[in-house]
Image (cartoon, helix red, strand yellow):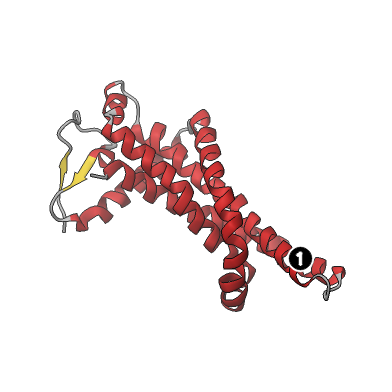
Amino acid sequence: MTTYVAAPAMTQAGPSDDLTLVPARKPARSLTGFLSMTGGVLVAALTRPPAVREFFRQAGAIARVSVLPMCMVAIPLAVLIVLVLEALVFGPTGFPTHAVLVAAAAGATVVFAEADSARIQRDIGAMRSRGIDITHGFVVPRVLATAVAAVPLAFIAVAAAGVYFFSAFGKHTPLSLFIGNLLQLMSPLNILIVVIEAASLGLIAGLIACYRGATAT
Protein backbone atom coordinates (compact mmCIF):
# COMPACT_ATOMS: atom_id res chain seq x y z
CA MET A 1 0.00 0.00 0.00
CA THR A 2 1.22 3.49 -0.83
CA THR A 3 1.44 6.49 1.39
CA TYR A 4 1.17 9.95 -0.10
CA VAL A 5 3.08 13.02 0.97
CA ALA A 6 1.97 16.57 0.44
CA ALA A 7 3.60 18.44 -2.42
CA PRO A 8 6.14 20.84 -0.94
CA ALA A 9 4.70 24.01 -2.51
CA MET A 10 1.12 23.42 -1.47
CA THR A 11 -0.67 25.27 1.26
CA GLN A 12 -2.67 24.03 4.21
CA ALA A 13 -4.96 21.03 4.03
CA GLY A 14 -8.37 21.38 2.51
CA PRO A 15 -11.26 19.25 1.25
CA SER A 16 -9.56 18.77 -2.13
CA ASP A 17 -6.16 17.61 -0.90
CA ASP A 18 -6.24 14.63 -3.23
CA LEU A 19 -5.58 17.01 -6.12
CA THR A 20 -2.32 18.22 -4.62
CA LEU A 21 -0.83 14.99 -3.39
CA VAL A 22 2.06 13.37 -5.15
CA PRO A 23 2.82 9.66 -4.88
CA ALA A 24 5.58 8.53 -2.55
CA ARG A 25 7.68 5.46 -3.22
CA LYS A 26 4.76 3.03 -3.12
CA PRO A 27 2.17 4.13 -5.69
CA ALA A 28 -0.28 1.29 -5.01
CA ARG A 29 -2.52 3.52 -2.94
CA SER A 30 -3.44 5.70 -5.90
CA LEU A 31 -6.76 3.84 -6.02
CA THR A 32 -7.66 5.24 -2.60
CA GLY A 33 -6.88 8.77 -3.71
CA PHE A 34 -8.85 8.29 -6.91
CA LEU A 35 -11.91 6.99 -5.06
CA SER A 36 -11.67 9.85 -2.59
CA MET A 37 -11.55 12.39 -5.42
CA THR A 38 -14.46 10.63 -7.16
CA GLY A 39 -16.58 10.91 -4.03
CA GLY A 40 -15.74 14.60 -3.73
CA VAL A 41 -16.66 15.18 -7.37
CA LEU A 42 -20.02 13.44 -6.99
CA VAL A 43 -20.85 15.44 -3.87
CA ALA A 44 -19.84 18.73 -5.49
CA ALA A 45 -21.74 17.96 -8.70
CA LEU A 46 -24.94 17.04 -6.86
CA THR A 47 -24.94 19.81 -4.27
CA ARG A 48 -23.76 22.83 -6.27
CA PRO A 49 -24.31 23.98 -9.87
CA PRO A 50 -21.22 23.50 -12.04
CA ALA A 51 -19.12 26.31 -13.47
CA VAL A 52 -21.05 26.68 -16.73
CA ARG A 53 -18.48 28.75 -18.62
CA GLU A 54 -15.66 26.37 -17.76
CA PHE A 55 -17.85 23.40 -18.67
CA PHE A 56 -18.57 24.71 -22.18
CA ARG A 57 -14.94 25.68 -22.69
CA GLN A 58 -13.78 22.19 -21.80
CA ALA A 59 -16.51 20.49 -23.85
CA GLY A 60 -15.52 22.54 -26.90
CA ALA A 61 -11.84 21.72 -26.46
CA ILE A 62 -12.54 18.00 -26.09
CA ALA A 63 -14.84 17.99 -29.12
CA ARG A 64 -12.27 19.79 -31.29
CA VAL A 65 -9.50 17.30 -30.58
CA SER A 66 -11.73 14.21 -30.64
CA VAL A 67 -14.01 14.55 -33.68
CA LEU A 68 -11.36 14.04 -36.37
CA PRO A 69 -9.72 11.01 -34.68
CA MET A 70 -13.20 9.64 -34.03
CA CYS A 71 -14.11 9.83 -37.72
CA MET A 72 -10.81 8.25 -38.73
CA VAL A 73 -11.14 5.43 -36.20
CA ALA A 74 -14.88 4.79 -36.43
CA ILE A 75 -14.99 3.15 -39.85
CA PRO A 76 -12.12 0.63 -39.68
CA LEU A 77 -12.62 -0.16 -36.02
CA ALA A 78 -16.36 -0.52 -36.48
CA VAL A 79 -15.71 -3.02 -39.26
CA LEU A 80 -12.99 -4.99 -37.50
CA ILE A 81 -14.30 -4.95 -33.94
CA VAL A 82 -17.68 -3.38 -33.34
CA LEU A 83 -19.71 -4.83 -36.20
CA VAL A 84 -17.90 -8.18 -36.06
CA LEU A 85 -17.30 -8.86 -32.37
CA GLU A 86 -19.50 -6.47 -30.40
CA ALA A 87 -22.49 -6.96 -32.68
CA LEU A 88 -22.33 -10.64 -31.81
CA VAL A 89 -21.71 -10.17 -28.10
CA PHE A 90 -23.12 -6.79 -27.07
CA GLY A 91 -25.24 -5.69 -30.01
CA PRO A 92 -25.45 -2.07 -31.22
CA THR A 93 -24.85 -0.80 -27.69
CA GLY A 94 -21.20 -1.69 -28.11
CA PHE A 95 -20.58 1.45 -30.16
CA PRO A 96 -19.70 3.66 -27.17
CA THR A 97 -16.72 1.41 -26.46
CA HIS A 98 -14.42 2.74 -29.14
CA ALA A 99 -16.02 6.19 -29.05
CA VAL A 100 -14.92 6.63 -25.45
CA LEU A 101 -11.55 5.04 -26.21
CA VAL A 102 -10.97 7.95 -28.58
CA ALA A 103 -12.32 10.42 -26.02
CA ALA A 104 -9.98 8.98 -23.42
CA ALA A 105 -7.01 9.09 -25.78
CA ALA A 106 -7.65 12.51 -27.33
CA GLY A 107 -10.09 14.49 -25.22
CA ALA A 108 -8.91 13.30 -21.83
CA THR A 109 -5.33 14.07 -22.87
CA VAL A 110 -6.33 17.74 -22.99
CA VAL A 111 -7.73 17.52 -19.47
CA PHE A 112 -4.66 15.63 -18.23
CA ALA A 113 -2.20 18.12 -19.72
CA GLU A 114 -4.11 21.14 -18.43
CA ALA A 115 -4.48 19.70 -14.94
CA ASP A 116 -0.79 18.79 -14.80
CA SER A 117 0.20 22.22 -16.13
CA ALA A 118 -2.03 23.96 -13.59
CA ARG A 119 -0.51 21.92 -10.77
CA ILE A 120 3.02 22.69 -11.93
CA GLN A 121 2.27 26.40 -12.27
CA ARG A 122 0.85 26.45 -8.73
CA ASP A 123 -2.55 27.50 -10.05
CA ILE A 124 -4.28 24.96 -7.84
CA GLY A 125 -2.50 26.31 -4.77
CA ALA A 126 -3.42 29.85 -5.76
CA MET A 127 -7.07 28.86 -6.21
CA ARG A 128 -7.12 27.31 -2.75
CA SER A 129 -5.52 30.39 -1.20
CA ARG A 130 -8.37 32.46 -2.65
CA GLY A 131 -10.90 30.13 -1.07
CA ILE A 132 -11.97 28.44 -4.32
CA ASP A 133 -13.17 24.84 -4.05
CA ILE A 134 -10.80 22.98 -6.39
CA THR A 135 -13.14 20.04 -6.87
CA HIS A 136 -16.10 22.23 -7.81
CA GLY A 137 -14.29 24.84 -9.88
CA PHE A 138 -11.59 22.74 -11.53
CA VAL A 139 -12.50 19.05 -11.64
CA VAL A 140 -16.30 18.94 -11.95
CA PRO A 141 -16.53 20.99 -15.20
CA ARG A 142 -13.87 18.83 -16.86
CA VAL A 143 -15.43 15.55 -15.77
CA LEU A 144 -18.89 16.61 -16.93
CA ALA A 145 -17.51 17.93 -20.21
CA THR A 146 -15.83 14.60 -20.96
CA ALA A 147 -19.02 12.69 -20.15
CA VAL A 148 -21.15 14.95 -22.36
CA ALA A 149 -18.66 14.95 -25.25
CA ALA A 150 -18.60 11.14 -25.28
CA VAL A 151 -22.31 10.95 -26.19
CA PRO A 152 -22.14 12.67 -29.63
CA LEU A 153 -18.91 10.77 -30.32
CA ALA A 154 -20.85 7.53 -29.93
CA PHE A 155 -23.45 8.66 -32.47
CA ILE A 156 -20.72 9.84 -34.84
CA ALA A 157 -19.33 6.31 -34.66
CA VAL A 158 -22.72 4.81 -35.50
CA ALA A 159 -23.26 7.24 -38.39
CA ALA A 160 -19.76 6.71 -39.81
CA ALA A 161 -20.18 2.95 -39.73
CA GLY A 162 -23.57 3.21 -41.42
CA VAL A 163 -22.27 5.50 -44.16
CA TYR A 164 -19.36 3.14 -44.74
CA PHE A 165 -21.59 0.14 -45.34
CA PHE A 166 -23.95 2.14 -47.50
CA SER A 167 -21.11 3.40 -49.69
CA ALA A 168 -19.36 0.02 -49.80
CA PHE A 169 -22.33 -2.21 -50.42
CA GLY A 170 -24.98 0.26 -51.60
CA LYS A 171 -24.79 -0.95 -55.18
CA HIS A 172 -25.88 -4.41 -54.11
CA THR A 173 -28.11 -3.48 -51.18
CA PRO A 174 -31.51 -1.82 -51.57
CA LEU A 175 -31.83 1.57 -49.93
CA SER A 176 -34.88 0.38 -48.03
CA LEU A 177 -32.85 -2.41 -46.45
CA PHE A 178 -30.11 0.01 -45.44
CA ILE A 179 -32.63 2.41 -43.88
CA GLY A 180 -34.36 -0.46 -42.12
CA ASN A 181 -31.09 -1.69 -40.64
CA LEU A 182 -30.15 1.83 -39.56
CA LEU A 183 -33.53 2.37 -37.90
CA GLN A 184 -33.20 -0.96 -36.13
CA LEU A 185 -29.75 0.03 -34.95
CA MET A 186 -31.03 3.40 -33.72
CA SER A 187 -34.16 2.17 -31.97
CA PRO A 188 -35.23 4.19 -28.89
CA LEU A 189 -34.00 1.49 -26.52
CA ASN A 190 -30.61 1.28 -28.22
CA ILE A 191 -30.31 5.07 -28.23
CA LEU A 192 -31.02 5.19 -24.50
CA ILE A 193 -28.47 2.47 -23.79
CA VAL A 194 -25.87 4.16 -26.00
CA VAL A 195 -26.35 7.49 -24.20
CA ILE A 196 -26.05 5.89 -20.76
CA GLU A 197 -23.00 3.83 -21.69
CA ALA A 198 -21.21 6.67 -23.45
CA ALA A 199 -21.86 9.15 -20.64
CA SER A 200 -20.76 6.64 -17.99
CA LEU A 201 -17.56 5.69 -19.79
CA GLY A 202 -16.85 9.36 -20.55
CA LEU A 203 -17.33 10.19 -16.87
CA ILE A 204 -14.79 7.54 -15.91
CA ALA A 205 -12.34 8.82 -18.53
CA GLY A 206 -12.69 12.37 -17.22
CA LEU A 207 -12.18 11.31 -13.61
CA ILE A 208 -9.04 9.35 -14.45
CA ALA A 209 -7.64 12.19 -16.57
CA CYS A 210 -8.23 14.78 -13.84
CA TYR A 211 -6.75 12.59 -11.13
CA ARG A 212 -3.69 11.57 -13.11
CA GLY A 213 -3.11 15.10 -14.33
CA ALA A 214 -3.41 16.66 -10.89
CA THR A 215 -1.18 14.06 -9.22
CA ALA A 216 1.40 13.63 -11.98
CA THR A 217 5.02 14.01 -10.98
Residue 26 in sight in this render: yes
Give the percent coordinates (x, y) of residue 82.
59, 70
Instruction: Indicate the quadrant where residue 140 lies.
Output: top left
Give the percent coordinates (x, y) of residue 199.
54, 52
Asked whether 47 or 215 is in front, the reply is 215
Task: Name the kind of residue labelled 1 in the image.
Answer: Ser
Residue drawn where x is 70% and y is 65% of the image: 164
Q: Which residue is mark 1?
A: 167
Q: Secondary structure at mark 1?
A: helix
Give the percent coordinates (x, y) of residue 22.
20, 44
Which residue in the rendered view is the most extreme toward the bottom? 88
Q: Is residue 106 above or below residue 121?
A: below
Residue drawn where x is 39% and y is 34% of the image: 138
Residue 186 in sight in this render: no
Asked whether 108 or 141 is in front, the reply is 108
Instruction: Indicate the quadrant where residue 112 lies.
Output: top left
Instruction: Indicate the quadrant where residue 175 lies.
Output: bottom right
Residue drawn where x is 16% and y is 59% of the image: 1
Give left or right: position of 63 versus 158: left
Which residue in the rendered view is the most extreme toward the top? 130
Give left or right: position of 116 versus 147: left
Question: How many numbered tags mark residues here?
Answer: 1
